[in-house]
């Protein structure tokens, strides 16, 4: 049964995003609004030490929990449809993941479209992953991401496989955007209940800006269409009230059919990346806790 708190937050989020949509803000204005609002709402846990730095010329930060028991670390790739998102908007979520997994997380502030279309974000993720691998004596590195960051995490694993480089120890994907062609049925059936994407306007714009003229069905842009055998162990969490639900359901099925280890959990009453509200209601805490345990087991 859905908790009362999550029901309240769902309707609050839906109302707030509907008001923002009515204003018809430009992309720079939307970025500014998100960067200003998110730090007040999604706070970094007190038990996390934040140290800003650059890795492979990519800005970011190490988020280190007070209790650090694992041998490895996590590379975190944020959401925002490849055109928004930053450490300001997502460091709270990444910090809660570091706390749950009990290992350091490197938050990668990869380059955004349209200023930097594909493959800029992927190039950043590859360079950061390889640099961390080289500077930590080959200790295990898991990759986690939400929304576009989840799709980017999957594309990173695919690119590393193609380069015959050390694979991530595991992938943790929260509401990943894996199909930028919008071929999943949930894009037609879920808009009325999705607070973030009540229509396809923003996602289609973002897909075009990110692809930068390249085919959106390309396997490193829409990793759902890749060959998905021999992938790292993967855990996927997705909400039942989001248009991207089938991006996850189809991904998990295809991975299992192609003999990769993949588990999916659908939270029926949840919306897109509800884990941002970790510490606020039980469904967010439950998801972060489960993901943290999954990653910790593969990094110890």
Image (cartoon, rainbow, N blue to C red):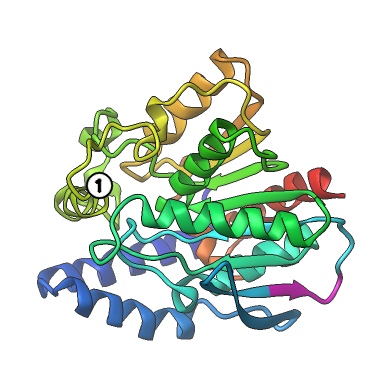
Q: Is residue 244 left or right of residue 60?
A: left
- Magenta segment, prevailing SS (helix, strand or loop): strand
Residue 273 in view in this figure: no
* x and y percentages locating residue 117 in the rendered image: 28, 56
Q: Is residue 288 left or right of residue 151?
A: right
Residue assigned mark 1: 211
Q: Which of 220 and 247 is in front in this view?
A: 220
Q: Is residue 15 above or below residue 123?
A: below
Q: In this view, does 91 lie to the left or right of 72?
A: left
Picture quadrant of residue 1: top right
64 magenta-colored: yes
Q: Nearer the viewer, residue 287 or 103?
A: 103
The residue segment tinted magenta is 63-67
228 magenta-colored: no
Residue appearing at x 42%, y 40% in the figure = 240
* x and y percentages locating residue 289 in the rendered image: 71, 54
């Amino acid at each position: 049964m859905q908790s009362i708190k999550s029901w309240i937050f769902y309707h609050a989020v839906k109302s707030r995003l509907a008001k923002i949509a009515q204003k018809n803000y430009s992309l720079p204005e939307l970025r500014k609004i998100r960067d200003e609002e998110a730090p007040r709402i999604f706070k970094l846990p007190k038990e996390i030490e934040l140290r800003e730095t650059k890795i492979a010329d990519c800005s970011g930060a190490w988020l280190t929990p007070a209790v650090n028991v694992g041998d490895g670390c996590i590379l975190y790739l944020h959401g925002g449809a490849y055109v928004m998102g930053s450490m300001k908007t997502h460091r709270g979520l990444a910090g809660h993941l570091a706390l749950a997994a009990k290992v350091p997380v490197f938050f990668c502030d990869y380059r955004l479209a349209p200023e930097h279309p594909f493959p800029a974000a992927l190039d950043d993720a590859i360079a950061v992953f390889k640099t961390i691998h080289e500077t930590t004596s080959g200790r295990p590195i898991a990759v986690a991401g939400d929304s576009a960051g989840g799709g980017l995490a999957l594309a990173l694993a695919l690119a590393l496989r193609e380069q015959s480089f050390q694979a991530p120890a595991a992938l943790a994907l929260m509401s990943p955007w894996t199909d930028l062609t919008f071929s999943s049925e949930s894009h037609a059936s879920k808009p009325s209940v999705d607070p973030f994407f009540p229509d396809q306007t923003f996602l289609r714009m973002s897909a075009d800006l990110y692809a930068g003229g390249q085919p959106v069905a390309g396997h490193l842009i829409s990793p759902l269409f890749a060959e998905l055998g021999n992938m790292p162990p993967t855990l996927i969490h997705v909400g039942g009230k989001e248009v991207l639900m089938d991006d996850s359901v189809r991904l998990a099925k295809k991975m299992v059919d192609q003999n990769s280890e993949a588990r999916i959990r659908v939270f029926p009453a949840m919306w897109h990346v509800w884990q941002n509200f970790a510490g606020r209601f039980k469904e967010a805490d439950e998801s972060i806790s489960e993901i943290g345990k999954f990653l910790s087991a593969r990094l110890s």
